[in-house]
Image (cartoon, helix red, strand yellow):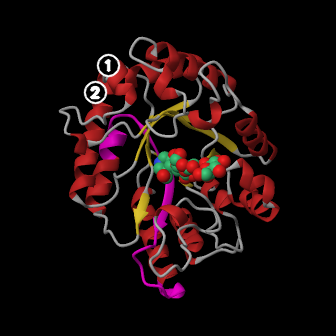
Amino acid sequence: NTPLRNRAAAKGLIYGAATQTSILRSDTKFATRFAQECAMLVPENELKWKMLRPSLNSFDFTRSDWLANFASKNNMFFRGHTLVWHKSLPEWFKARVNSQNAEQIMLKHITTVVKHYAGKIHSWDVVNEAVFPEHGRADYLRNTPWLKFLGPNYIDFAFRVAAQADPKALLVYNDYGLEHSTPNDEAKRTAVLKLLERLKSKGTPVQALGIQAHLEGEAPFNTKKLRAFLKDVADMGLKIMITELDVADNMLPKNVLVRDRLIAGIYEDFLSVVLDEKAVIAVLTWGLSDRYTWLRDRKSRKDSASVRPLPLNAHMERKLAWYAIARAFDKA
Ligand code: G3I
């Protein structure tokens, strides 16, 4: 009956999840279960530019402060997602940001936001999803407004500014598509290692890799390659966080028992590899209950059955996935 947060803590690990202000405020049953199971809270959207920056010259911390306060009241770590990303930018961004002012605007954003939570935050996803080999660049970087305005060093700049604003927070590079054995994921692992090596060699203060781990129910992952990748990252002196774990079940059979077994098996296989690596410090799921998941809209099922990617079902009860995570922590 022991909650995930206690099982993880017993092994020196952190278990937590992402959620949203509006969900915690409106659903007290969910909020209670969230506080029971999680030792870390990640704002799913509230720290993105779109929600934080109503205009070029203003910041609105109302929603993220509410979450920080909920975390602190419930004895949870608070984690920042994300300072620099190409998505969820505000409407005004396109018209107001250009190569002349981009550096100044990034500097002000990171400094203001990171200082606001300094001393209250465990870690920051400083840069999110900057690597995309499909864009065909020699350095594998994604074509984003930040790259266009500032060049490849925007990544180093962001980390240096964050480190100055809060020397204590753990600074993370976060990305997806690193888990499976597909050619795309293979290329992405190589590209992310190359980026991290370049950052480290220049003394850029990146301290951890965030592996999102949005797993696909039907895609295999190669245990050996995943293990080797984790070791390569650890050998660079970096910590590792599993930052957005869930299992998409849109391609899995409809039968709930069959489906839940498959999903739980993927959680357990993945975590048994991941938790073997001593550099891993935290496992966070992207949501806690199937009632609230981005996959409902983004990877819905053709048969219109509801998706079941998370540890708790829509009634806040533990599923096989929950027991799989629990076992993985117990064995770690
Ligand atoms: O809050 C507004 C609401 O006022 C409005 O009426 C409604 C109409 O569309 O939109 C609401 O905002 C949505 C927001 O989620 C809150 O639900 C945005 O449209 C929607 O784009 C946003 O999606 C989020 C997405 O990132 C884009 O920022 C998802 O919730 C969130 O789970 C997802 O998370 C990302 C991570 O940040 C990075 N890694 C991948 C992961 C999954 O895509």
The image quarter containing residue 286 is: bottom right
Residue 281 magenta-highlighted = no
**Residue sitting nearer the eye, 269 or 105:** 105
Mark number displayed over residue 202: 1
Q: Hey, which residue is sitting farthest front in the picture?
A: 95
Q: Is residue 3 left or right of residue 229?
A: right
Q: Residue at x 56, y 76 (%)?
A: 306
Residue position marked by numbered label 2 in the rendering: 198
**Residue sitting nearer the eye, 221 or 253:** 253
**Picture quarter with the N terminus:** bottom right
Residue 223 lies, with reference to residue 77, above or below; the image says below
For the residue marked with disc 2, what is the amino acid?
Arg
Q: Work out whether residue 319 can be spotted.
A: yes
Q: Residue at x 45, y 23 (%)?
A: 158
Location of residue 112 in the rendering, given as x and y in whole percent from the top left corner: 63, 20
SS for tag 2? helix
The region drawn magenta spans 231-258
Q: Residues within 10 Å of mark 1 (few under 14, many from 20)?
A: few
Location of residue 16 in the rendering, given as x and y in whole percent from the top left corner: 62, 53
